């Protein structure tokens, strides 16, 4: 039985990797643990947790998405590339490949990315799905790797947060000024909508 260990990485797209690094590394504090690329193509990974990453492709001509309310239906272009689920063993990756093929789904060959082994497929909704096994001994969270042949000065600052780039927060709202607004689902857990 395949045992999943989290989302290996979410893969997004950007037209400006420097701004993306400034946000994810420097503002949010997620370490930059892998940078692969060359002029015209970059693929960078940020550490969310011990098992989860978010990655961005930088492609010329990519523009920011149109802002919309979270969860609101939309049509037209959007910015999601694929989701990668981590598996605990290499054997589990091969088992998933066999199961997908037996069920009639297209699945790629096993691809070695140096730090992960991956297979690629699509769910019934044509959502691009990757399954990844982290190669033991190549833990990018412990030993970040930058293999971009043309890194910018922002990237050369390293994997750790550069917090001085952003304004420092003086204080947060005091408890007496905090208001929590009810949202869809609160009645399921509180009996009534929280805040009512």
Image (cartoon, grey):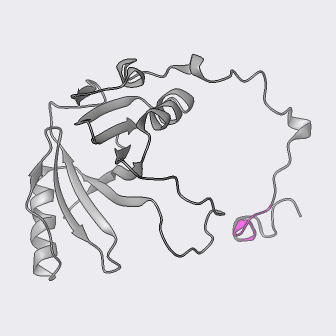
Q: Quarter-wise, where is residue 143 in the image? A: top left
Q: Is residue 138 left or right of residue 162?
A: left
* Magenta stretch in the rendered image: 182-187
**Mostly what secondary structure, the magenta segment?**
loop
Q: Residue at x 86, y 32 (%)?
A: 174
Q: Residue at x 16, y 82 (%)?
A: 103
Note whether 192 is above or below 137 in the view shown. below
Q: Quarter-wise, where is residue 169 in the image? A: top right
Residue 93 image offset from top left, x and y in percent: 14, 58
Magenta stretch holds residue 18: no
From the image, which quarter does the N terminus lie in? bottom left
From the image, which quarter does the C terminus lie in? bottom right
Q: Residue at x 48, y 64 (%)?
A: 78
Residue 77 showing in the rendered view: yes
Residue 70 image offset from top left, x and y in percent: 62, 62
Q: Is residue 175 left or right of residue 99?
A: right
Magenta stretch holds residue 183: yes
Note whether 67 is above or below 59 in the view shown. below
Q: Please identify the residue farthest to the right as the structure is shown.
A: 176
């Amino acid at each position: 039985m395949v045992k999943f260990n989290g989302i290996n990485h979410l893969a997004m797209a950007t037209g400006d990797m420097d701004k993306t690094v400034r946000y994810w590394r420097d503002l949010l504090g997620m370490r930059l643990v892998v940078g692969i690329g060359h002029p015209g193509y970059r693929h960078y990974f940020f550490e969310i947790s011990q098992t989860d990453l978010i990655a961005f492709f930088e492609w010329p001509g990519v523009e920011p998405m149109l802002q919309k309310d979270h969860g609101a239906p939309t049509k037209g272009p959007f910015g999601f590339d694929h989701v990668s689920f981590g598996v605990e063993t290499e054997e589990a990756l091969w088992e998933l490949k066999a199961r997908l093929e037996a069920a009639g789904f297209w699945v790629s060959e096993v691809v070695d990315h140096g730090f992960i082994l991956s297979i690629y497929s699509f769910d019934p909704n044509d959502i691009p799905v990757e399954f990844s096994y982290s190669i033991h001994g190549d833990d990018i969270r412990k030993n970040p790797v930058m293999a971009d042949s043309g890194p910018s000065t922002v990237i050369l600052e390293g994997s750790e947060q550069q917090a001085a780039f952003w304004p420092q927060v003086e204080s947060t709202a005091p408890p007496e000024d905090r208001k929590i607004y009810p949202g869809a689902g609160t009645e399921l857990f509180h009996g009534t909508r929280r805040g009512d």
